[in-house]
Amino acid sequence: MEKYLRRIVALVEWWAICLLAGLVVVVCLGVFFRYVLNASLVWYDEFASYLLVWLTFFGSVVAVYHHRHIGFELMVEGLAPQARRAVDLVAEIAVLGFQFVLFYYGWILTERMGDETTISLPWVKVSWVTSVLPVTGALMLLISLARLADIVSRRPRGGHGTWSG
């Protein structure tokens, strides 16, 4: 399972790099058109916002995989291995709860958006934009379920913030 997750996360990392490159290009185009050609692009700020949202959520998948989300590592590191494992278990269950909400309600939102289009990009459906919620929610759920299985079976995963003992 770890091998497949590693491959998926590698693809997500490349996708995030592409999103960042696209964001840079779109913002540079917007600035160039506005300040050099004195002709603003009506769509660039909305498109850049969507790229930033997608970049944030796909970056969150990578952060979850590398166990880089917000935590109290300094406090947890001082605990005995069994207590640390219990804290990791509770924390992972809480994270799973959030990820499930993200996936479930993201799915509902994406379905409800249907064929609605964005304001300045009439060829872009809002459901395409909101689809990032269930997709990244599902990816994070997979990663956290694997981590939860490792915690329960006492197999610590590599990376930072994992229990030892």
Image: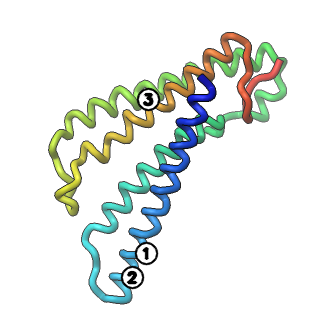
Contact, mark 2 vs mark 1 (Cβ under 8 Å): yes
Residue, far top: 153
Q: Which mark is residue 138?
A: 3
Residue sitting at x 59%, y 41%: 63
**Which residue corresponds to mark 2?**
32
Per the image, label 1 sits on a secondary structure element best described as: helix
State the separation of the CA atoms marked 3 and 2. Answer: 38 Å
Name the amino acid type tagged 2.
Phe
Q: Where is residue 60? Give x, y as percent.
A: 53, 42
State the separation of the CA atoms marked 2 and 1. Answer: 6 Å
Nearer the observer, 70 or 134: 134
Label whose residue precedes the other's in the sequence (3 or 1) = 1
Q: Which mark is residue 48?
A: none
**Which residue corresponds to mark 1?**
28
* Residue 39 sits above or below residue 46 on the image: below
Side of 115 where 62 appears, left or right: right
Q: Where is residue 102? Give x, y as percent.
A: 41, 31
Image quarter of the C terminus: top right
Nearer the observer, 70 or 60: 60
The crowding category of the residue bearing disc 3, from other C-alpha atoms within 10 Å (few below 14, some 14 to 19, many at least 20), is some
Residue sitting at x 32%, y 88%: 37
Please identify the quarter of the rendering in which residue 163 is found.
top right
Label whose residue precedes the other's in the sequence (3 or 2) = 2
* Residue 61 sits above or below residue 86 on the image: below
State the separation of the CA atoms marked 3 and 1. Answer: 33 Å
Please identify the quarter of the rendering in which residue 27 is found.
bottom left
Per the image, label 2 sits on a secondary structure element best described as: helix
Side of 80 where 108 appears, left or right: left
Q: Where is residue 68? Give x, y as percent.
A: 65, 39
Name the amino acid type tagged 3.
Ala
